[in-house]
Image: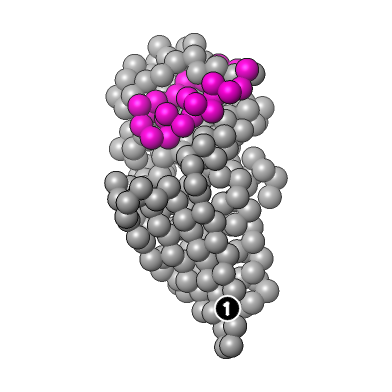
Amino acid sequence: MRILLIGAGGRMGHAVLAAAAQDSSLTIAAKVERGGALALALERCEVAIDFTVAEATEGVVQSCAERRKPLVLGTTGQSAGQKEAIAAASREIPIVFAANFSIGVNVLFALARRAAELLGKEFDRDIIEMHHRTKKDAPSGTAKRLAAILGEDLVEPVSVRAGDIVGEHAVIFSGTGERLELIHRAGSRATFAQGALRAARWVVRQSAGLYSMEDVLGL
């Protein structure tokens, strides 16, 4: 499988390149940075993976839709208008749009949803997320996803930006005399890269639509 990697020079781009080098079933056939020549690069590939910035999203999804190329979109922090562009493109091509490609984090989503159902609103709900000091969006896309699962009217994520923390998310349910904590810690970006490649293998077999990593994993 031939992949176009958009944002190859970034942190996640480097991680995807390293993970792809360990898999003989696929190849990074083209690499571009934000604002690069997408049209020509897409011609040589079967699927695109994007880890750039939210400002580039509209151009990426439109180019992929025009050329009927499936897309794995790992960029977060999009505005309402940019999300509308993603939705519009998904009517033409399959797109996996995920806040986090870690398998463990997506299991965390499922566990948090089930815990919220079982514990009810009698338990207070909190989310704490931690990332490296250069991460631009706060709260993270993962924390926003958790907030949507738990009820955005009940919880507002707390964000910490410090050092070189790869990523940590804690969901805390606090009741009278007891507390339940669900925590995911990422020690390496390799886990996100492997998840993105798994999504790329999956999305090329799908019809047009907007999918999540939970769809990829069957959760």
- Magenta segment includes 13: yes
Q: Which residue is mark 1?
A: 179
Q: Is residue 208 visible?
A: no
Q: Which residues are magenta?
A: 1-24
What is the quadrant of residue 208 in the picture? top right
- 120 horizontally vs 84: left or right: right
Task: Name the image quarter holding the N terminus.
Answer: top right
The picture places residue 64, in percent across and down from the top left corner, at 46, 24
Q: Is residue 100 visible?
A: yes
Q: Residue at the spot x=51%, y=74% of the render?
A: 125
The relative height of residue 129 versus residue 194 in the rendered view (above or below) is below
The picture places residue 156, in percent across and down from the top left corner, at 41, 68
- 135 horizontally vs 26: left or right: left
- 164 horizontally vs 64: left or right: left
Q: Amino acid at mark 1?
A: Arg
Query: Which residue occupies the extreme right position in the image?
Result: 218
The picture places residue 80, in percent across and down from the top left corner, at 37, 49
Q: Residue at the spot x=38%, y=66% of the render?
A: 158
Q: What crowding class fits label 1: few (fewer than 14 Cα within 10 Å), some (14-19), or many (20 or more)?
A: few
Query: Which residue occupies the extreme bottom position in the image?
Result: 176
The picture places residue 133, in percent across and down from the top left corner, at 30, 50
- 115 horizontally vs 183: left or right: right
Q: Residue at the spot x=64%, y=77% of the render?
A: 119
What is the quadrant of residue 8 in the picture? top left
Q: Residue at the spot x=59%, y=74% of the render?
A: 180
